[in-house]
Amino acid sequence: MAILSKEEAQTLLKKALAYSKAEECEVSLNGSDAGNIRYARNSVSTAGDISQLTLAVSSSFGKKTGVATIDEFDDASLAKCVLRSEELAQLAPENPEHMPLLGPQDFPESVTYVPATAAITPDTRAEAVAKSIQVSRDAKLQAAGYLENSVTFEAMLNSKGLFAYNKGTDVVFTITTRNEEGTGSGYAARGFNDVTKLDTFTATKIAAAKANGSIGAKAIEPGKYTVILEPVAVAYMLESMFFGLDARNADEGRSFMSKPGGGNRIGEQLMDPKVSIYSDPFNTDLPSSTWNREGQALEKRSWIEKGVVKNLSYSRYWAGLKNVAPVPFPGNIIMEGGTESVEDMIKNTEKGILVSRLWYIRMVDPQTLLLTGLTRDGTFYIENGEVKFPVKNFRFNESPVIMLNNVESLGKPERSISVESYRSYLVPPMKVRDFTFTSLSDAV
Amino acid sequence: MKRKEFLHMAGMGLGSLALPSLPFGSRMIDPAEALQAGMDKATKKQLADIALNAAKSGGATYADVRIGRYLNQFVITREKRVQNIANTESFGVGIRVIANGSWGFAATNDVTPDGVARTAAKAVAVAKANSKIITEPVQLAPQQGYGEVSWKTPIVKSVFEVPLKEKIDLLMEVNGIALSGGANFVNSAILAINEQKYFASTDGSYIDQDIHRIYPNFTVTKIDKASGKFQTRRSLSSPVGMGYEYLTPTPESKVSGIVTRYKDRYDILEDAKNATADVAQKITAKSVEPGKYDLVLDPSHLWLTIHESVAHPTELDRVLGYEANYAGTSFLSLDKWKSGNFHFGSKLMNIVADKLQPGSLGAVGYDDEGVKCGKWDLVKEGVLVNYQAIRDQAHIIGLKHSQGCCYAQSWADVQFQRMPNVSLQPGKDGLSVDDIIKNVQKGIYIIGDGSFSIDQQRYNFQFGGQTFYEIKEGKIVGMLKDVAYQATNQEFWNSCVAIADERDYRLGGAFNDGKGQPGQSNAVSHGSSTARFNGVNVINTARKIG
């Protein structure tokens, strides 16, 4: 068992810190108990359980820092690890951006841990997968899927007396269903802290409906279309923009947040007024830790408010240089939406394309955040408020910043995972005009 | 696919300087510890035998054991400072078995007689549990035991033996050249990996291997403050299966032309100077007019196109559907291969899979299921002739033995099918790069790899690059920017009309190619000579925001 309680973690950290002779020392613990099961062609292919507990010691002398880690916790091993970090610090080059450690702080307890998820066993996983495979077989499809769950904890203690602890759970499920002929494919992805919200049966039903619904796709001309992006497509499309909410890159002139002539775009109306993006560690659908690894508190914070850039993250070093308060990078990202469902949005669309999922998104130009990627697993033509027929997949070249200027309407936000990073976001389905498809793909 | 790392770092303007994910159970060490000998071979053999016997007595019909020590060193800098130095070590054992016709796997860092016996028993238990829900039993291609053998990457000097200071000094010199040349920012890094792998199986093999890889790289950035525009130029180095000697340039390893490119030795200081000049030129370069162009692709660029459009779709597990939920499937379905008549490309397209190529990232003596490595054709004169397979797939394509494509990123991960080095063979018509360019009327010459994206069956792709040069009536007339090309895979390869000869042949490669769930990283090289593709669709990628 790699998960220590707050008290156990604090005791072990205090013991390690007692060996320190450095000017500043921070000890931290990181533990995880994780399990996974993978299947393809309606049959389980691999399964595994992974457990890990690591202690890291960071020692500093002046602006020189050394880090050592260890996975044995007897007194001699702890002493050796602390000593090694001190030796490495003496050998290290000076870091001109070194920041002194923070002192004690009170962090509120997070809501990231759900006991039901921590109680998942290999049998629970196998049962969840068996339900999914059955749906696929009944629909005469081939299922390939993956389920992974984890309990993790992090704790830190430093020589200035700062102590922090957080424990969390996570479960992620993804499912692809395809027909034997390879002419139809559907997908669903789910991510939760609380496994009782995970329904592999219904998720696979949705994937199966998309697979059977996408058979016989017609080719239509690429070009600019009004699109309805489902939340799993929105999360992946916006992820690189979320990662780019950084003041330093912007101030240095190498980000889409850089302002021509110098500085950054804080205060600028960069997107449609319907767009508001914020973080909140206490959101019950997408909770996060209440502190970060630098020992800073994570609080509710607005990034984009009614299309205006409100905040960018400032590291402590950069904030000092710019004479502003540090703004830690957020632990979660939430985009506000409306009340419409995807079905409602389709009903209100005269002509457009429904995009179930996006794939292989890569940065083409970081200065405008131009991205390329493709649609997949269910792309449909909408006319007069109805899905008319499936269409062949498209390649797009589009910037999320431009896209968020073209928002027609936003639906009800839903927790969704980015299909590449497996990180969760809370985002709405969205209808946007003039989304740029540049070519067709034969891929199913 | 350089997946997660790329995504996470791209938004931070760090581009290629992503850190590879560390193997499970890694710990930070003193650089001196990396030079200490690990567990001796005799002890490893004893432990392997204990594991194999435990597996067999538990009911396994086959078992293999991998005792691995994985060392990493990263030195990462920006401008005038060292950002990070990390030395890590991961040591443990992974045991894979077949019981009741099903695979089972378990791993531990407790590399003791008790630890390996317990883990072997656990692997058998997992196999037996999985056997209740499999549809067909594993069919393993026969494999002879080799007895006690060994293999080592033929390096001249281990990166781990070179003092850290020497590496830092070199990177600081790179950064100094860029900054004094007018660049606003520069990131640089030296990444090194050493895999010390011991493999044993119930077939009677005991294989000891020592594998080395290095990847020096940098990115130079220039800002045009007034317009708010910026440009970058990455190094033209490749990750390679070599030691520190890769950073000792020789005149014969240089390829002269519009900019110097490199074969098996790399001049990082010269390239830093050239990159700084290139990035300034990129700021004022002409924005491309979209349309059809003949493309002349340098090996520093073409490797990535080969990787995505040829190497991934010939992975047999993708073809069969095992990667459907993550990496995707493949347009190269079995019926196309069986027809013997599927024209993937023009007659000039000869693609070879090679696990032995000197200096390549994929070069090993034996794969991670004890198969001696070799070389085979994937595409011959444009026709698809073969795939990449491992032992439990060989029978599906009528092979009596595995092609040796099995790899695990560490002892803690189960081995599965990963691509070998996959390379385009040089042309046989004695063409030089200049010969190719002089025949192009309206074209673009592309150097270095850039943005890349391809669909889940590998039909439609889009690639960028580092530098782009306009060719008009057989001559390079200037630099272009905002270039990306889009094509359909089969059409693209059928438009290949010229390939330079072996004098121009060079390797590029991916240090972190992602696949599988949970994800694993693989390193692989792709060689080619400069090649020409006719009538490819080029788009303009410039946009305006704010």
Image (cartoon, coloured by chain):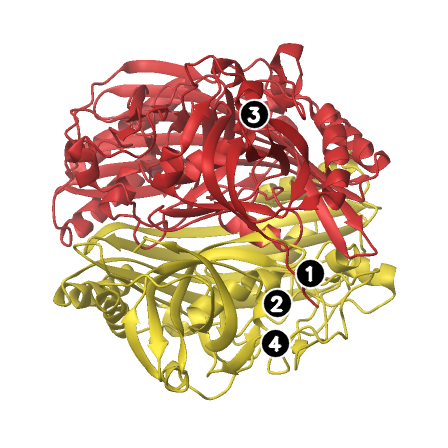
The residue that mark 2 highlights is A401
- Chain to which the residue tagged by mark 1 belongs: A
**Crowding at label 1, few (<14), some or many (≥20) Cα neighbours within 10 Å?**
many
Which label belongs to residue B283? none
In the rendered structure, which amino acid carries the disc numbered 1? Phe
Residue B243 falls in which quadrant of the image? top right
Secondary structure, mark 3, is: helix
**Are both tags, 4 and 3, on one chain?**
no
Distance between mark 1 and mark 2 Cα atoms: 9 Å
Q: Nearer the viewer, residue B108 or B390?
A: B390
**In the image, residue A50 above or below residue B123:** below
The spot of residue A58 in percent (x, y) is: 69, 48
**Crowding at label 3, few (<14), some or many (≥20) Cα neighbours within 10 Å?**
many
**Are both tags, 4 and 1, on one chain?**
yes
Instruction: Tell me which chain appears red.
Output: B
The residue that mark 1 highlights is A256
The residue that mark 3 highlights is B437
Distance between mark 3 and mark 1 Cα atoms: 36 Å
- Chain to which the residue tagged by mark 2 belongs: A
Secondary structure, mark 1, is: loop
Distance between mark 3 and mark 2 Cα atoms: 39 Å
**First in sequence: mark 1 or mark 2?**
1
**Crowding at label 4, few (<14), some or many (≥20) Cα neighbours within 10 Å?**
many
The residue that mark 4 highlights is A277
Secondary structure, mark 2, is: helix
**In the image, residue B486 above or below residue B252:** below
| Horizontal side, residue B329 vs residue A400: left or right | left
Q: Nearer the viewer, residue B100 or A226?
A: A226
**First in sequence: mark 4 or mark 1?**
1
Disc 1 to disc 2: CB gap under 8 Å: yes
